[in-house]
Amino acid sequence: MPDWNIPFKLYIDACGDGLETALHQVQIINDKPTEGPVCYISGNIKRTESRYGACQMEWLCLVWALEKLHYYLYVSDFEVITDCNAVKSLLNMKTPKRHILRWQIAIQEYRGNITRAHKAGNIHKNADGLSRWELTNTPDKPAYVP
């Protein structure tokens, strides 16, 4: 169960196949601080999104994660950890394209709660795996069967 008074860690990663987010939190377990997962989410990208460059894919992943995890992140401080340094520049762009401007507006409500950190791709493993695992979702092979 998450503790709303402790900051979250939002690990994001995107690749040509999909988006992945791992939401973690450090809690005290047996008198030791232990980082553990709160949830993992992943999603496929649309055909038009597959044409985005690496930076735009990471920005898309951040906006998508904030939308999906709004319930957790709206009331809490959190750190975004990514393997792409360009995520830091998203909020500071002066004349972005329209879709990037919409992303900037979507992120604005979290601006006071959010900090950003870079983690090299070779050690950014908890958010990397699911973004590269293709999940088919067709009528003959549904991704989820209740």
Image (tube, rainbow, N blue to C red):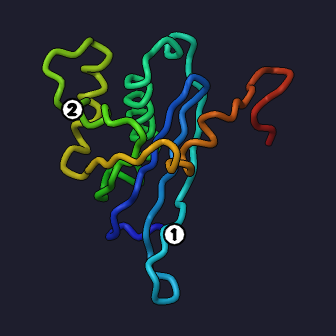
**How many residues crowd mark 1 within 10 Å: few (<14), some (14–19), many (20+)?**
few
Q: Residue at x 59, y 36 (%)?
A: 131
The amino acid on which the numbered mark 2 sits, given as a three-letter code, is Leu
Q: Which residue is mark 1?
A: 1
Secondary structure category for the residue under label 1: loop
Q: Residue at x 58, y 29 (%)?
A: 18
Q: Residue at x 63, y 33 (%)?
A: 132
Could you tell whether 24 is left or right of 117 in the image?
A: right
Q: Residue 34 location in percent, x, y?
A: 48, 74
- Foreground residue among 11 and 102: 11
Say which of marks 1 and 2 sits in front.
2
Residue 139 falls in image quadrant: top right
Q: Residue 35 location in percent, x, y?
A: 48, 68
**Residue 139 drawn above or below residue 31:** above
Q: Quadrant of the C terminus?
A: top right
**Residue 88 drawn above or below residue 118:** above
Q: Earlier in the sequence, mark 1 or mark 2?
A: 1
Q: Are marks 1 and 2 in contact (CB under 8 Å)?
A: no
Q: Residue 133 location in percent, x, y?
A: 69, 35
Alpha carbon of mark 1 to alpha carbon of mark 2: how far?
31 Å
Q: Residue 14 location in percent, x, y?
A: 51, 32
Q: Which residue is mark 2?
A: 91
Mark number, residue 66: none
Could you tell whether 132 is left or right of 135 in the image?
A: left
Secondary structure category for the residue under label 2: helix
Q: How many marks?
A: 2
- Foreground residue among 83 and 10: 83
**Residue 60 drawn above or below residue 80:** above
The amino acid on which the numbered mark 1 sits, given as a three-letter code, is Met
Which residue of the protein is positioned furthest toward the left in this rendering? Answer: 94
